[in-house]
Image: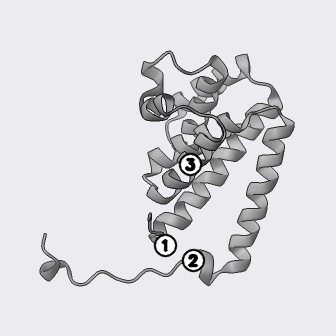
Amino acid sequence: MSSETTGPAVQRIFIDKQGPKAYHTLVQTSEAVRAAAADAELDRVAVELINLRVSQINGCAYCLNVHTKAALRAGETTQRLGVLAAWRDTELFTPKERAALALAEATTVPSDATAQESAYDTARQVLTDDQISAVIWVAITINAFNRVSIMSKHPVR
């Protein structure tokens, strides 16, 4: 479709700038979630894998850019980052990472009740209660940030 038939693109507002108090509260929530993940001994690489996988599902280019850099800083490899979208088809991820990724996906797409139950059952086998809670909170938080960036059309430069 040409731009002649669809009209000019509407300039999006950056809702994080338009509603700074709400955004600041989201940032504070993210900081609390990061601390809870650390307290639960969920390492930074695992947290960034969750952030990336959820951002892949949601198609958030801005968050993918931010969290790819963060994952590399945390020690993640380019090989694992390159295959993250197909993590189930590799042997590159530990049982705990696999459980966390499945649970994060189930949190992101909660309408698939069968996948949700399966992910939760697997998580119960290899993650502590605190780690399960942290994984779900990380997924919830990055889902919120994805929506902020997607709806604001934050640019990737």
Compared across the picture, whether 63 is left or right of 42 comes to: left
Q: What residue do we see at 30% from left, 80% from top? A: 9
What amino acid is found at the position of numbered circle 2 in the picture? Ile
Q: Which residue is mark 2?
A: 15
Within 10 angstroms of label 2, few (less than 14), some, or many (20 or more) residues? Answer: some
Q: Residue 29 lies in what quarter of the image?
A: bottom right
In the image, residue 126 above or below residue 109: above
Q: CB of mark 1 within 8 Å of CB of mark 2?
A: yes
Instruction: Name the element at disc 1.
Output: helix
The first of marks 3 and 2 along the sequence is 2
In the image, residue 50 above or below residue 79: below
* Viewer-side residue, 68 vs 112: 68
* Viewer-side residue, 81 vs 51: 81
Spot occupied by residue 1 in the image (x, y as percentages of width and height):
13, 69
CA distance separating discs 1 and 2? 6 Å
Spot occupied by residue 95 in the image (x, y as percentages of width and height):
63, 17
Within 10 angstroms of label 3, few (less than 14), some, or many (20 or more) residues? Answer: few
CA distance separating discs 3 and 1? 21 Å
Q: What residue do we see at 71% from left, 38% from top? A: 44
What amino acid is found at the position of numbered circle 3 in the picture? Lys
Name the mark on residue 67: none
Q: Residue 86 lies in what quarter of the image?
A: top left
Compared across the picture, whether 2 is left or right of 78 comes to: left
Q: Which residue is mark 3?
A: 69
Instruction: Name the element at disc 3.
Output: helix
The first of marks 3 and 1 along the sequence is 3
Compared across the picture, whether 81 is left or right of 124 comes to: left
CA distance separating discs 3 and 2? 23 Å
Spot occupied by residue 152 in the image (x, y as percentages of width and height):
49, 72
Q: Which residue is mark 1?
A: 152
Spot occupied by residue 100 in the image (x, y as percentages of width and height):
64, 30
Q: What residue do we see at 69% from left, 79% from top? A: 20
